[in-house]
Image: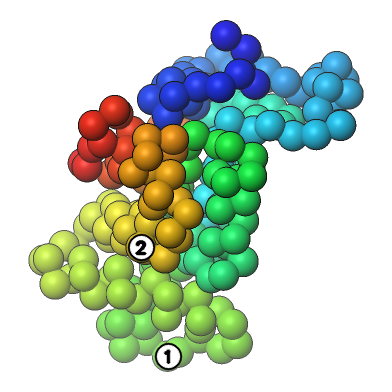
Amino acid sequence: MSDSMARTPRETFDLLMAGNQRFVAGSPEHPNQDAARRAEVAPGQSPFAVLFGCSDSRLAAEIIFDRGLGDLFVVRTAGHVMGPEVLGSIEYGVSLLGCPLVIVLGHDSCGAVGAARDAVGGAPAAEGYVRDVIERVTPSILASRAAGHTEDSDFIAEHVRASVDLLLDRSRALSEAVDAGRTAVVGLSYRLTDGTANVVTTRGLDAVGAAV
């Protein structure tokens, strides 16, 4: 089956994670990155997954998952916070491009999460629109603190879960696609040191749905 053919959410997820395993092992295949692929996708795109992740420069989606041109529909913001533009972009990938998978990608040592933790702890407020980013991350920090968490990994995981929940709550188009089995949403946490992308939570990944 070629990468451009229709896949189930589970098959799509397995394809993406196989690429991450190659990246971690130091044996990437660099698929779809040559001149032939450039010419192939020039008339139109048919990506197989939406990747909504943090803007951190160390989180380059096509590298992490060993993919190439036309494979991923990527949306990135600091701290993977979302507004109408993000929701519209993700819905475009799912409703118009037919992507059967949406990945929400967080990572350790996230600056936005760290800044929100500092702000909750009483640090001086940030200026400009950076403050807006921090305020959108803050509910995740408060929930994680209320649960008694102290480790960075727990705060990151909580923010990934909160982002998945908020995305499904705010996007009727996406939640209906998940309910119908056309699309799944998976929250992943990326480790900067070893390159692994680890599952935090899933919605609709298998036929009967799942929640981790």
Q: Nearer the viewer, residue 35 or 111?
A: 35
Mark pair 1, 2: CA separation: 31 Å
Q: Nearer the viewer, residue 121 or 62?
A: 62
Residue assigned mark 2: 169
Tally of marks: 2
Residue assigned mark 1: 124
Please name the residue shown 44% across and 35% down the image.
182
Q: Residue furthest left?
A: 148
Amino acid at circle 2: Asp
Please name the residue shown 23% across and 32% down the image.
208
Q: Can you give x and y, in whole percent of width and height, for residue 66 in the image?
A: 59, 25
Q: Secondary structure at mark 1?
A: loop
Q: Secondary structure at mark 2?
A: helix
Please name the residue shown 54% across and 29% down the image.
65
**Image height of 147 relative to 95, above or below:** below
**Image height of 1 relative to 162, above or below:** above
- In the image, which is nearer the foreground, mark 1 or mark 2? 2
> If the image is split into quadrants, where does the C terminus sit?
top left
Q: Residue furthest top?
A: 1
Q: Quadrant of residue 187?
A: top left
Q: Quadrant of residue 127?
A: bottom right
| Residue 23 makes an appearance in the image | no
- How many neighbours does mark 1 have within 10 angstroms: few (below 14), some (14-19), or many (20 or more)? few
Please name the residue shown 26% across and 36% down the image.
209
Q: Can you give x and y, in whole percent of width and height, for residue 157 in the image?
A: 29, 53
Residue 105 placement, left or right of 40: left
Question: What mark, if any, has residue 17 been given in the picture?
Answer: none
**Image height of 46 relative to 89, above or below:** above
| Residue 78 makes an appearance in the image | yes
| Disc nearer the start of the sequence (1/2) | 1
